Every structure is written in C-alpha cells, then in structure tokens.
Amino acid sequence: MITRVPLSGLTLAAAMVGAGVSPAVASAAQPPVPGYHCHMLHSHENGAWMGQVNCFPFHGATHRGPIHGVFTISGHTHEGTEKTVTCRAHEGQHSGFAELPVWVRGFHCD
C-alpha cells in the first residue's frame, strides 16, 4: 500500500531539484534590439550592409539620421534568401545611418 503525503511548496521545490528539474527563476527580460526590415539587403565593403526599398523601423529604431548602439537589418539578398545582420558601433562611432523608407546602412555588421 502506498501512502500519499502532501508536499509543501518548499518540499516540492527540493524534490524537483533532486530529480533534476530546475524550478523557474524570474529574470529581468532584455529589451528587444531595434531594427529595420527592408525589401533588399546588400553587403558592402568592410562589414557594412545596406537595406533598401520600403524600409521600416521596429522596436524604437530611428527613422532618419545616425543610429547609435546595436541594431539589426533584415531583407532579401540578391540570391533571394531572407537574411538578418546585426550591426554595432566601433571605437566611439555611430553604428549606422537611416533615411527611411528609402535605405538604412549599418557598419561593422555580422
């Protein structure tokens, strides 16, 4: 005969950890990275990328002017595949420049 014993929250958490199940831990969510989606995406020299045609911003990306900080550009390459690149500032410079909806250019992208 099996006897069932009610488990308290703390006992249950300890049993889960002992069984290899990690309890959920609340963590601060990172804000989404700003970015742009354009119809076309082209690579340029020195790790620069340019998005062109019907570009729109998301997650607070600027519409016009210099871009500071990390951001993404996505679009279709000449081969027709969808690609996303992440661009970053380098040595105190801005990380890109936007002139929406026509184009956005990112520097030091991968």
Image (cartoon, rainbow, N blue to C red):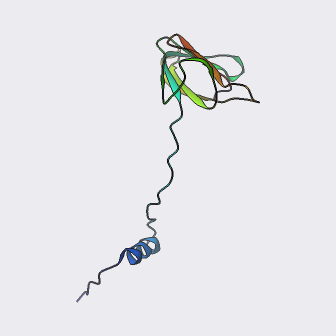
Give the x, y percent position of residue 92: 75, 29
Residue lying farthest to the left in this orientation: 1
Q: Which quadrant: the N terminus?
A: bottom left
Foreground pick, 6 / 82: 6
Q: Which quadrant: the C terminus?
A: top right
Give the x, y percent position of residue 43: 62, 18
**Which residue occupies 44% across, 75% down?**
14
State the image quarter where residue 23 is shown.
Answer: bottom left
Q: 101 left or right of 70?
A: left
Q: 19 left or right of 63?
A: left
Give the x, y percent position of residue 86: 59, 30
**Which residue occupies 49% across, 11% down?**
53
Give the x, y percent position of residue 41: 54, 17
Q: Is residue 85 visible?
A: no
Q: What is the tally of numbered marks visible in this picture?
A: 0
Foreground pick, 5 / 8: 8
Q: In this view, does 10 lie above or below 107?
A: below
Q: Can residue 29 be seen in this view?
A: yes
Q: Is residue 52 above or below residue 84?
A: above
Residue lying farthest to the bottom in this orientation: 1
**Which residue occupies 68% across, 26% down?**
108
